[in-house]
Image (cartoon, coloured by chain):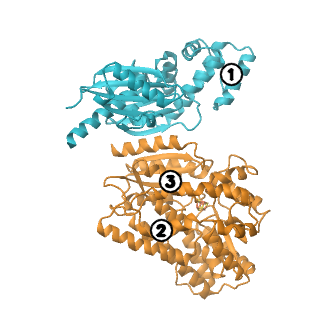
Chain colours: A orange, B cyan
């Protein structure tokens, strides 16, 4: 990644620490991805992007900034990309998924904060992630308490706008979210200097819907009894979709889906017949957090679906494309986003319905419900999730972990025993 | 058939257990030794001991389990300790509906068995509260052996330790000593803390059928078994061979492996 050094310098990054981060990544990519056999050819694209994760895409973003476009960094799938795109802005996901950044976060946050938040704050304050440097504005949201408070700290270092996400899903909450989206649109217009018109917003809605459909096509292929792609590869594709250009993302996912559909027709599977099919559910797996998938898939299981924000919650449900007024479009956006079932809401029984539905759709043998340490919301929901699954006769394993590797062996034992249990 | 015996090796964090079973599942040999610093050396030592006892490793299928299971190069297969403890307990207690509580050196497992197979399990997280290690550290602090601590506890009462974390609990114990609290009472508090932690874990698996039994290194301590029974409101069974449950389960897995292999031939 040496050609990017001057770019990183211009971004004001801490090059010395960043070198350390760059040293560990190739080994991790090699161990987790490149050791797999019979990978789809289409993964070449994501292998390339991840191998130069701090180079290729950041460079593109900077080129666009030079043309006057603004980059918005987001932390939650509730923030509507469409609005930003309609004002010719660019969205990049900013959730931190590496232990590398956790100590930096702990320097200012309580230790008992979830690692996703600690890593995100650490990545910004430690100046070791180009995406966190490039973003002109961060868009936060009032989902969990940890994030809300962390945004106050981040806001001292970078322009920050926070959207007020409702906590319930009544009709008035959907209306309220519509108003929040409208207010956000105004902010984005001011910040970019571009006006959001009905036409532009419709086009943005269409682009993001196409991206959702393409992601869904890949996931659809994972429903087949003959499994054409590993969970690790699907997760990598999903994680990178958060910061790639949406049009190219859709193209690449569609190309991959073509290949996977062909594989299914030809009976090409990445695992031996009878390999137990696992649905993972819980908190998001931000790049480069591959620990869970890696352990499951090197312990004799195959991950066939993620009921997560880095998974189905990102692409399920489309926005209505037929609205002809901004007001109508904001409402259509609100209706779509409010269908996402996050544990920040109460009640959140929709998530359990989703999980039960996906167990059937993806022909799942067992569910692993995994939350990040100190995420009280998803941890608490484990009770209802495991009860519903047990009632449905579906084996479930509840886990809690963080980004450190220290519990890898313990996880391996639990996950190994769970797969032994499924194998009978 | 090539062999007449099967070998199960359970390398735990404190002790390594080995069981040799005949084809009809009777015990031919049991070995117990401390794991020491290196599981690799322990595995090698086990290999030599088996050989001198007349059960060379080449002569039977071997399955390894326990946290050191990957350090047994000559094992035909590794199976997790959860599956092995479940299988072993079924065999030892002659039951196919069971709740197994295994208090191990560094972790505690609750395993539910239905129809002779593991149907659910729980394991404590990273911390060592409610494990054999906790007991060992507290016994050290009180300058007694773990089994002595347990029998002393039967004579004590009236004191409790509030901290679940081993490090903090240890300083609580030290300040109890400093305050001149009777050792029996402190011992009581230590066992009580383990029992509370383990029974709240077991409570999360409530509603199971069949007996509750204790396996692992602590199953030879009568007072612990008694207080656990009281806390759970049901009789907790122990067996003489309880600490060999993991190795037994591994040997049974080896037996199944061999049957499967000869069927494939
Ligand atoms: S888990 Fe909830 S708060 Fe986190 S990204 Fe998803 S929707 Fe947003
Ligand atoms: S994982 Fe939980 S605690 Fe962490 S950011 Fe998401 S909702 Fe908040």
Towards the viewer: A352 or A150: A150
| Mark 1 and mark 3 residues within 8 Å of each other at the beta carbon | no
Residue at point 41% right, 63% down?
A39
Residue B49 spot, x, y in % from top left: 38, 21
Task: Residue under label 1, please give it.
Answer: B173
| Extreme residue toward the front, this view | A2
Residue located at (74% from left, 63% from top): A13
Residue A346 visible in the shown view: no
Task: Specify the quadrant that holds the C terminus of chain B.
Answer: top left
Distance between the alpha carbons at the discs numbered 1 and 2: 59 Å
Label 1, label 3: how far apart the Cα atoms are: 45 Å
Residue that label 2 marks: A44
- Is disc 1 in the same subunit as disc 2? no
Q: Quadrant of residue A406?
A: top right
Mark 2 and ligand 1: say if the CB distance to the nearest ligand atom is below 8 Å: no
Q: Quadrant of ligand 2?
A: bottom right
Note whether residue A265 is visible: yes
Q: Earlier in the sequence, mark 3 or mark 2?
A: 3
Residue A31 is marked as: 3
Instruction: Give the structural element (helix, strand or loop) at label 1.
Output: helix
Name the residue at 49% across, 55% down: A32
- For disc 2, the neighbor class at 10 Å (few under 14, some 14 to 19, many from 20) is few
């Amino acid at each position: 990644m040496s050609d990017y050094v001057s770019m990183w310098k211009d971004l004001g990054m801490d090059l010395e620490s960043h070198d350390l981060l760059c040293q560990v990544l190739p080994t991790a990519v090699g161990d987790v991805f490149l050791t797999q056999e019979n990978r789809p050819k289409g993964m070449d694209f994501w292998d390339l992007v991840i191998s130069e994760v701090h180079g290729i895409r950041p460079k593109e973003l900077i080129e666009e900034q030079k043309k006057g476009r603004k980059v918005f960094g987001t932390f939650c799938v509730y923030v509507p990309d469409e609005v930003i795109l309609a004002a010719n802005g660019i969205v990049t996901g900013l959730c931190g998924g590496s232990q590398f950044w956790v100590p930096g976060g702990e320097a200012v946050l309580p230790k008992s904060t979830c690692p996703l938040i600690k890593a995100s704050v650490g990545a910004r304050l430690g100046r070791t992630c180009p995406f966190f440097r490039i973003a002109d504005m961060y868009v936060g949201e009032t989902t969990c308490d940890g994030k809300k408070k962390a945004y106050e700290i981040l806001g001292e270092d970078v322009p920050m706008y926070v959207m007020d996400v409702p906590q319930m899903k009544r009709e008035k909450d959907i209306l309220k979210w519509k108003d929040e989206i409208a207010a956000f649109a105004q902010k984005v217009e001011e910040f970019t200097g571009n006006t959001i018109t009905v036409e532009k917003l419709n086009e943005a809605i269409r682009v993001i819907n196409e991206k959702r459909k393409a992601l869904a096509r890949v996931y659809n292929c994972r429903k087949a009894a003959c499994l054409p792609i590993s969970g690790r590869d699907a997760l990598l594709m999903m994680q990178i979709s958060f910061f790639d250009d949406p049009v190219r993302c859709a193209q690449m996912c569609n190309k991959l889906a073509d290949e996977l559909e062909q594989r299914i027709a030809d009976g090409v599977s990445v695992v031996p017949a009878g390999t137990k099919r696992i649905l993972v559910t819980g908190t998001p797996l931000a790049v480069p957090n591959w620990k869970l998938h890696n352990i499951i898939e090197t312990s004799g299981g195959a991950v066939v679906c993620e009921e997560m924000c880095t998974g189905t919650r990102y692409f399920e449900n489309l926005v209505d494309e037929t609205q002809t007024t901004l007001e109508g479009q904001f409402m259509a956006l609100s209706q779509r986003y409010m269908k996402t079932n996050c544990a920040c809401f109460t009640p959140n029984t929709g998530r359990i319905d989703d999980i039960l539905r996906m167990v059937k759709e993806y022909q799942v043998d067992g569910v692993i419900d995994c939350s990040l340490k100190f995420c009280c919301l998803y941890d608490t929901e484990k009770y209802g999730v495991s009860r519903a699954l047990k009632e449905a006769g579906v084996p479930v394993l509840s886990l809690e972990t963080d980004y450190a590797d220290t519990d890898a062996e313990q996880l391996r034992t639990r996950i190994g025993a769970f797969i032994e249990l499924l194998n009978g | 058939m090539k062999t007449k015996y099967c070998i199960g090796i359970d390398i735990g964090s404190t002790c390594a257990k080995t069981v040799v079973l005949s084809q009809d599942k009777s015990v031919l040999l049991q070995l117990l030794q401390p794991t020491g610093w290196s599981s690799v050396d322990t595995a090698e030592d086990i290999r030599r001991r088996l050989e001198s006892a007349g059960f060379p490793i080449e002569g039977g299928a071997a399955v390894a389990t326990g946290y050191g299971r990957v350090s047994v190069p000559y094992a035909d297969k590794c199976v997790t300790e959860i599956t092995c403890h479940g299988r072993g307990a079924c065999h030892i207690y002659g039951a196919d509906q069971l709740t197994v509580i295994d208090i191990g050196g560094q972790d505690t497992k609750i395993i539910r068995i239905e129809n002779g197979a593991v149907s659910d399990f729980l394991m404590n997280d990273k911390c060592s509260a409610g494990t054999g290690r906790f007991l060992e550290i507290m016994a050290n602090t009180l300058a007694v052996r773990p089994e002595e601590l347990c029998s002393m506890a039967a004579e004590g009462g009236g004191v409790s330790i509030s901290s679940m974390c081993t490090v903090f609990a240890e300083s609580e114990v030290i300040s109890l000593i400093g305050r001149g609290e009777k050792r029996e009472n402190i011992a009581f508090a230590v066992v009580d803390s383990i029992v509370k932690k383990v029974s709240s874990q077991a409570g999360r698996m409530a509603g199971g059928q069949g007996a509750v039994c204790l396996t692992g290194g602590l199953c030879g301590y009568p007072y612990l078994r008694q207080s656990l029974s009281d806390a759970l409101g049901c009789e907790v069974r122990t067996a003489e061979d309880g600490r060999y449950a993991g190795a037994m389960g591994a040997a049974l897995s080896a037996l199944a492996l061999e049957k499967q292999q000869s069927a494939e031939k």
